[in-house]
Amino acid sequence: MNTSLSWIKKYVPDLDVTAQEYTDAMTLSGTKVEGFECLDADLEAIVIGQIEKIEPHPDADKLVICQVNVGKETVQIVTGAPNVKEGQKVPVVLDGGRVAGGHDGKKTPGGVRIKKGKLRGVESCGMLCSIEELGSTREMYPEAPEYGIYIFPEDAVVGESAIHALGLDDVVFEYEITSNRVDCYSVIGIAREAAATFGKKFYPPVVTSTGNEENAADYIKVTVKNPELCSRYCARVVKNVKIGPSPKWMQRCLAANGIRPINNLVDITNYVMEEYGQPMHAYDLDTIEGREIVVRCAENGEKFVTLDGQERTMDESVLMICDGQKPVGIAGIMGGENSMITDQVKTVLFEAACFNGTNIRLSSKKIGLRTDASGKFEKGLDPNNAQAAIDRACQLMEELGAGEVVGGMVDVCSQTKEPVRVEFEPEKINALLGTDISKEQMLEYLSRVELAYDEAANEIVAPTFRHDIFCTADLAEEVARFYGYDRIPTTLPDGEATTGKLPFKLRIEQVARDIAEYCGFSQGMVYSFESPKVFDKLRMAEDDMHRQAITISNPLGEDFSIMRTSSINGMLVSLATNYNRRNKNVRLYELGNVYIPKALPLTELPDERMKFTLGMYGEGDFFTMKGVCEEFFEKVGMKEKPEYRPD
């Protein structure tokens, strides 16, 4: 999970810390920062300049001499850029400044220092920069030319920092998020944690998108046939769509998170997915037959071509998004080529849903396709987040002038999720932490992460996006995070030391092992699974209780299809294997379980009985084995004399 500092500051504007301070504090409060990258680490003394005059170089046809106004002065710069024109505003690195690397996009560690010098006999006091030399890419700045220097818009201010104007004075953080904190797989979740860690005010997006006076239900109908796999499906419609580039601030946010900007519509869905942690998808409504969405499982062998142009074969466990006639997407993974968004789209259907995480993970594995969306669904999402995300997408469509939002929303919700309530016990929390924190201070810490206090019930109410809050220990962890683990006093465990000994069962096993090995036996290890054919090989009667074996539902093969009820077969197989390999004198013992069902079919767990089995051939005879057994019986305290029955 990556976020840029500038994106976090959209929701925590008062956050004023260095990258290292942020890293240390966030890690200590439980949101581990793996590392960070300062985008301007190798950039220095780069300003916006305006080209006032261009003259040809007297001794080089491919070079020109530019007089560039950099605010405080006009400097002379020689360049070979093919796209320079008088009046342009360009990035200029002055004498002594640094750029990140060359035009080929390869960064140089520590940057490249630019010094005043002469090019073919003409003095040059700096350098005009391409976007690659500034350490960025054309993917992040698609308006940059493939060859030549970067051109600023006309409203750029001469003399100001080009690094700031391009948004390169930013820091990108990489986080290691634990699987139980699904809410932190979003920028809003990270910003909430940052605000709580530094004691700042958190400002979530204010979403107001009611749309026009029409109703989305008049445009689309939604049917969910498998509600156990889709607990919520929200749909909204945007008409009169205008496809174009997204604004620079959005492109930079996406690029910082490793997402390539494409156009305003696609970028909005990706932006909301990163912002809220809620995957979204957009369909061309004009390609949806019957103006109907049906969420159903695929048919066995059903073929479907995804957006990447690959034909994939489904089975009945894969959840599909269909229209009135055909599939148009694989739920939670990828849309279909037949409903993809093109530049000619006029009406868009937005989808925000909550699919079963386990089903999405298994489906993704079966079809061999994993996406950013499936990765988020796999972790289990909050169904209450779907509406906020889809409303946010519609709001951005309105604000960016990308379309007209139709009023209303089609919302099919089969399962509701209620907040978890945990009894608030300050004394118990202090006992768990070894602290003396006041009740009021605890409530202040908890309120930072939206854990509300119900005074009437004396309960802490956890929001539905917090999947990790269930008991007092969880509340204690939240208090400790913001109180500071480093402030909790270190104490050594105390208590009365008691001597212990092995349980009776383990003592018997140890005696058996010692005696067998003392008498020259080696321990053998065999599978707990075996073939049902062993009963006939051992000539067991048809009504012998050992034939009542537990069948494995997913065996490796027939030879491993039942749980063993006797250890004799395993020992005989081991002895036979050694004999066939010409080992002359073999003595083996085994300590292993057999599994006796209480009833078949199984209604409860079987009895697991430990068996001590001895086997030998070669030197030694019946009396050798008899002596080993008698020694064992004596050591375990068996006073009655055993009887030997050769039958």
Image (tube, rainbow, N blue to C red):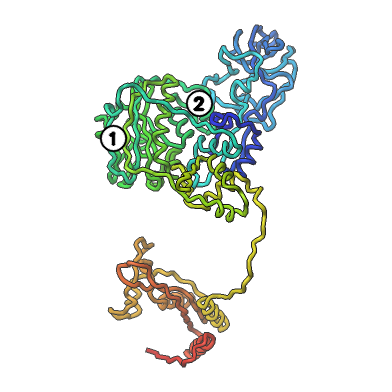
Image: 482 above or below 117: below
1 vs 2, front mark:
1
Task: Specify the quadrant of the image occupied by residue 565.
Answer: bottom left
Left or right: where 114 falls relative to 613: right
Left or right: where 614 falls relative to 75: left
Image: 427 above or below 593: above
Q: CA distance from mark 1 to mark 2?
A: 31 Å
Residue identified by numbered label 2: 250
Front residue of 495 and 601: 495
Residue identified by numbered label 1: 222
Front residue of 328 and 449: 449
Counting from the top left corner in percent of width and height, residue 266 is at 43, 28
Residue at 25% over, 34% down: 324
Quarter of the image that includes the C terminus: bottom left
Q: Is residue 429 visible?
A: yes
Left or right: where 633 falls relative to 608: right
The circle on residue 381 is: none
Front residue of 584 and 111: 111
Which structural element holds mark 2?
Answer: helix
Residue at 50% over, 40% down: 450
Q: Is residue 313 visible?
A: no
Whether tag 1 and tag 2 are in contact, CB under 8 A, the answer is: no
Counting from the top left corner in percent of width and height, residue 176 is at 56, 43
Residue at 61% over, 8% down: 86
Counting from the top left corner in percent of width and height, residue 390 is at 40, 31
Q: How many residues crowd around disc 2 within 10 Å: few (fewer than 14), some, or many (20 or more)?
A: some
Residue at 30% over, 81% down: 541
Counting from the top left corner in percent of width and height, residue 123 is at 74, 13
| Precedes in sequence: disc 1 or disc 2 | 1
Name the kind of residue labelled 2 in the image.
Met
Name the kind of residue labelled 1 in the image.
Val
